[in-house]
Amino acid sequence: MISLNLTITRFCRVALIILVSASQGLTSSDAQAWDVTLEEALDMAINRSARGGMIKGREEVAEQNYNARRINFYLPEISINGNVPAFSNDQSYRFFGGAQDKSLYETRDLNFNSFIELKQSVPISGGSFVVTANLTRADSRYPDTRFQSAQDRFVDENSRRGFFDFSLEQQLFRPSAAKYELHNKEDDLDIARMNRYEQQAALKKEVIEAYVSVLQLSVKRELYMDKLESATIKSSIDSMKLQDGIVSEEDFLLSTSDALDAELESSEIETQSEEQRRELAMLLDVSVTEQLVPLEPEITDHIDKAVQSRLVAAWEQSVPIHKARREYSKAERIADYAAAGHGLIGDLKAHYSM
C-alpha cells in the first residue's frame, strides 16, 4: 500500500512538471534571444526608459523654473493687451444731429485700444519699477447737418489719446522678495540635480542586481540540468537492474524519487530565472516577452589606494552632504525672510502719471 501511494504521488509530480515545462517551452520559443551587455543595460535604463526620463524631467522642470525667474529678475517683464481695430459702418434712414426730418445718413467709425505694461525688478535694491501705457485711437466720420445736402458733406474726427503711469515700489528694512524667490529657485535646481544623481544611482544598482541575478540563475540552471541528467540516467540504469533482479524495488523507488526531485528543482530554478529576466526587462522598459540574455561582464581592476584616499578625503563633496547644505541654506533663508516681517518694516512708493 505504501509503494502504491508513493507511485501515485510521483506520477502527479511528473504530470505537473510536464505541464510547467511545456508552458515555459512555448513562451521561450515565441520570442527571440537578445544578447545584452551590462553597459547597454545601464544605458537603456538611464537614457531610454520611462523611469530614466522621469528622473531627468524633474531636474529639467526645476531648471526651467530657475531660468524663467532669473530672466524676469534681470530683464523686464512685458505684457501687451489690446484688440484688433474695430470698424463699423451704419447707413440708415433716421434722424441725425439737429435735423428736423428723417434722411438717409451714413456714419463710419474705426477704433483701436491697446494696453502695455512693463515690470522691471531692481537688482540692487530689490524693488520693482512698473510702467503702464493705455493708448487709444478713434477715427469717426459723420454727416455735416449744418448744410441741407448733408449726404455730400462730412466731418472727419480723429482722436489719439495716451495715458502713462510710472510707479516704483521699494521694501525697506527687510530682504527683497525678488531676490528671495530667485535664490530659492536656485536651491531647488541644485537639490533637483542632487536628487537626479541619487535616483540614477539607485536605478543603476537595481539594474546591476537584476543583471547579476539573471547570470547567477543561468549558471545555477545549468548545474541543476546536469544534476537532472545524472539522476535520470541513474534511474534508467536502476530500472534495468530491477528487471534483472540486481537491485531491490525500494532502491529503484529511491532513484526515481531523486530524479523527480531533480526535475522539480530544475523547474523551480527555471521559473526563478524567468521572473528575474522579466524584472530586468521592466527595469529596461522593454517587453516582458523579450528573451534577454545577459552577457558576462568584463572583470575590472579594483580601485587603487590613491583613488580610495582621494575619495575619502573628498567626502564633504558627496551628494548627500551637498544636498543637505542646500536644503539647510534654503530653510535658513525662509526662516530669516519670515522673521524679517515681524520687525520694523516700511515700503517706499513713488507714483507719476501723465
Image (tube, rainbow, N blue to C red):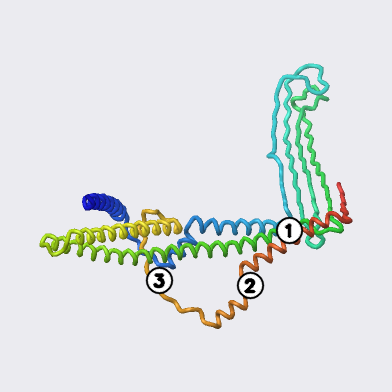
- Give the secondary structure at mark 3: loop
Residue underneath mark 2: 317
Does label 2 or label 1 sit earlier along the sequence?
1
Which amino acid is tagged 3? Pro
Q: Residue at x 41, y 57 (%)?
A: 281
Q: Is residue 18 visible?
A: no
Q: Residue under circle 1?
A: 73
Amino acid type at mark 2: Gln
Question: Total number of numbered labels?
Answer: 3
Q: Nearer the viewer, residue 124 or 149?
A: 124
Is residue 152 in view from this perspective?
A: yes
Q: Which residue is mark 3?
A: 297
Q: Which of label 2 and label 1 is nearer to you?
A: 2
Residue 215, located in which quarter of the rendered image?
bottom left
Give me the residue at 75% from left, 47% from top: 116
Q: CA distance from mark 2 to mark 3?
A: 30 Å
